[in-house]
Image (spheres, helix red, strand yellow):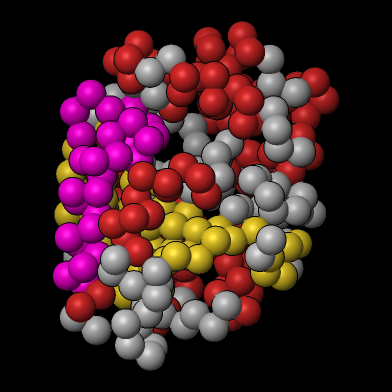
């Protein structure tokens, strides 16, 4: 299996498509918390037609190793380790939730390496105080005992999926339950702590980001509400916002065809302009 070494351990990755010209940006897909690179399966075919596509499992998720304790800034530095090891300098980043948080930090810290971003259902602000306390308790419990199905059904799935998606596709809840309990508990706990408990605001830093950005948010997203995406757009000089009706937090899974209709033309335009 292909792995790349970073300061946060070895990360599993998959590669699809191929660069059309030497030095072309690679499309890099960054998944959300409690998911892995497989969440992008419905996007891979269309994106691979544009060029080289990399899908990376985040620390403690999928097939990647359990990391030491880390912050989102640590994750960003490890992300650079991975890109360097894979001979990728310029990127077009597609990130959902946790993945979008890392993408924005990449664009702030390494602007020459990011030619475009698609940010789905994500936040540039810190988590609200009341929710941080609740999530801290969840993390401690799940690290010790795992994630009970009742917790997935009553608390986690409604944060991730719209009621309509859950009703139409109950397998989404089943898949989530089995997936999250298949990851190492310590790895998930450390990632969740970085993402939802210790995350700091980068809103004021976004004004320095000059790359074109597509922001997408499900109208029924309860994990990172529409206001979070609006706040991002209000600060990014070249951002546009699209809201998907009837969609929750996991837009790429709930409405993959709608996400593809937005992301693929956006990336095609900005990759072809290089």
Which stretch appears magenta?
244-270
Residue 148 higher or lower than 112, as above or below: above
Q: In which quarter of the image is the N terminus?
A: bottom right
Foreground pick, 109 / 17: 17
Q: Is 257 positioned to the left or the right of 16 in the image?
A: left
Residue 241 x, y percent position in the rendering: 19, 48
Foreground pick, 116 / 36: 36
Q: Is 210 positioned to the left or the right of 90 in the image?
A: left
Residue 266 sits inside the magenta stretch? yes
Residue found at x 55% / y 61%: 14
Residue 205 sits inside the magenta stretch? no
- Magenta: main secondary structure equals helix
Residue 50 higher or lower than 191, as above or below: below
Q: Is 156 positioned to the left or the right of 248 in the image?
A: right
Q: In which quarter of the image is the C terminus?
A: bottom left
Residue found at x 63% / y 25%: 178
């Amino acid at each position: 299996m292909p792995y790349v070494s970073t300061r946060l351990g070895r990360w599993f990755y998959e590669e699809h498509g191929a660069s059309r010209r030497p030095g072309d940006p690679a499309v890099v897909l960054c998944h959300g918390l409690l998911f892995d690179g497989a969440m992008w399966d419905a996007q891979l075919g269309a994106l691979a037609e544009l060029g080289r596509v990399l899908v990376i499992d985040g620390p403690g998720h999928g097939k990647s190793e359990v990391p030491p304790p880390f912050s989102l800034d640590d994750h960003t530095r490890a992300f650079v380790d991975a890109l360097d090891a894979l001979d990728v300098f310029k990127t077009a980043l597609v990130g959902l939730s946790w993945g979008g948080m890392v993408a924005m930090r990449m664009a702030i810290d390494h602007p020459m390496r990011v030619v475009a971003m698609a940010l789905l259902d994500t936040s540039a602000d810190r988590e609200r105080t009341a929710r941080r306390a609740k999530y801290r308790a969840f993390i401690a419990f799940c690290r010790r005992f795992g994630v009970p199905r009742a917790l997935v059904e009553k608390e986690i799935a409604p944060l991730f999926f719209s009621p309509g998606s859950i009703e139409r596709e109950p397998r989404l809840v089943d898949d989530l339950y089995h997936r999250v309990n298949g990851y190492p508990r310590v790895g998930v706990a450390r990632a969740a702590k970085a993402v939802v408990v210790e995350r700091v605001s980068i809103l004021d830093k976004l004004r320095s980001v000059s790359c074109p950005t597509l922001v997408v948010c499900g109208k029924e997203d309860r994990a990172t509400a529409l206001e979070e995406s609006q706040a991002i757009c209000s600060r990014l000089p070249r951002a546009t916002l699209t809201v998907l009706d009837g969609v929750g937090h996991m837009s790429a899974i709930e409405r993959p065809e709608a996400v593809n209709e937005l992301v693929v033309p956006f990336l095609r335009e900005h990759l072809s302009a290089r």
